Image: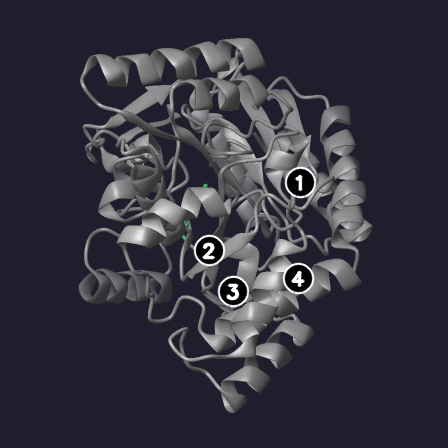
Amino acid sequence: MNPDETMVNAYRPGTPLPPEAQALIDRRTRLLGPAYRLFYETPVHFVRAKGAWLYDAQGAVYLDCYNNVASLGHAHPHVLAATAKQAETYASHTRYLNDTVLDCAEKLLSHFPPDLSQVMFTCTGSEANDLALRICFAATQGTGIVVTENAYHGVTHLMAGASPSLGRGVDLGPHVRLVPAPRDAASFAADVTAAFADLQRHGIKPAALLVDTIFSSDGVIPGAFLGPAVQATHAAGALFIADEVQPGFGRTGAHWWGFQTHAITPDIVTMGKPMGNGYPVAGLVARPEVLAPFGAKARYFNTFGGNAVACATAMAVIEVIEAEDLLTNATRIGAIMAQGLRSLTHEALGQTRQSGLFLGVDILQDGHPSATKAARLVNLLREARVLISATGPRGHVLKIRPPLILTEAQADQFLSATEQALRLL
Ligand code: PMP
């Protein structure tokens, strides 16, 4: 398989481009090598961003309905001020006593159920998942991992081996088993049970079920169905890790974390992306009894993970979510967007799935999933200066994740651009 087949919206080398864009791409390839990919048939070149707006090199303005890192809007003043203040005050690591890391841990834990009471900091979501698995290996004495069929969990060797969405060019780990994306609670739990049984049959002790609680790369599947799968995981002697890198920090509107929609309490919760609104900070929250065996045999030090600037930044992010009541905004604007999408009539539009400001829309041709049409729509919207992407095992699901500060007027702009793009499809 061509590795780009797993990223339907990637720029294809050879597409004719204006000379300046081509020169920039050539320079990138020369300096960054062959593994990077660019979004869109005609890649975009941004020089500045503020709120939900991105500005290209010619000064054209784009509406950001995709980037879930700058979840509070690009360049949020409260977050920038907190980062700058801490950077000029004290910026060192977790091997010295300092209040900031503890203040941040307390603030973060105040948004979790009481059983999840300890925090470990990393720099990226990949590191958080990698660490979560090492913790599960220590707690269960097992190494077997179950993930969904088109999951993405990160870039380290262990996480790439548990990220089937990277395509067949990247080998899965020998201790990894895949289950189909959930259709309902009972069948998902049965699939999880069967996957752990298969691991055991191969002499591999179960360690963890790891899922993104909004199943983003599996096609965006919100719902309340994970309870029986968590029970099945525990029955197999394994632990449940909720990957909140995408749904966390209020994106789903109703709750701070995607797992809360499922009315479960995970053993470990991993997080990243929006945690610093652009500053690299990530981490995990766990039950103390789950962390204990790992802490007893290994020491943990992450040079930049939990540094004072990262923690001051993450704290500021949480303060903004609270002060601006962004969960309410995500719920309100997300509902407007979903309702607007469902009211559009076009043969290419299939089901719209939505939770807060995370939306997935099936794109069809003759009633069947169509990656080609989805990619075309994504590119038409890019031409209309609205940024989204596509996802899912068949690449046919529009992935829409605007910042949580999106206004009603911006939601309307997205909807009318989509209506226009559908006319050109
Ligand atoms: N888990 C999920 C669900 C993700 O979407 C991502 C990033 N796309 C990661 C983990 C890895 O995070 P990072 O890129 O910060 O390492």
Of marks 2 and 1, the one in the foreground? 2
Q: CA distance from mark 4 to mark 1?
A: 15 Å
CA separation, marks 2 and 4?
14 Å
Residue bearing the label numbered 1 = 252
Note whether ligand 1 is within 8 Å of mark 1. Answer: no
Mark 4 element type:
helix
Please name whichever residue, 40 or 404, is drawn nearer the observer in this view of the structure: 404
Q: Determine the secondary structure under disc 3.
A: loop
Asked if labels 4 and 2 touch by Cβ distance under 8 angstroms, the answer is no
The residue pinned by badge 3 equals 278
Q: Which mark is residue 283?
A: 2
Rendering quarter of residue 394: top left
Q: Residues within 10 Å of mark 3 (few under 14, many from 20)?
A: many
Image x and y of residue 328, in percent: 80, 47
Q: Residue at x 27, y 13 (%)?
A: 198
Q: Position of residue 93 (x, y in %)?
A: 40, 76
Q: Amino acid at mark 2?
A: Gly
**Residue at image point 55% right, 59% down:** 275
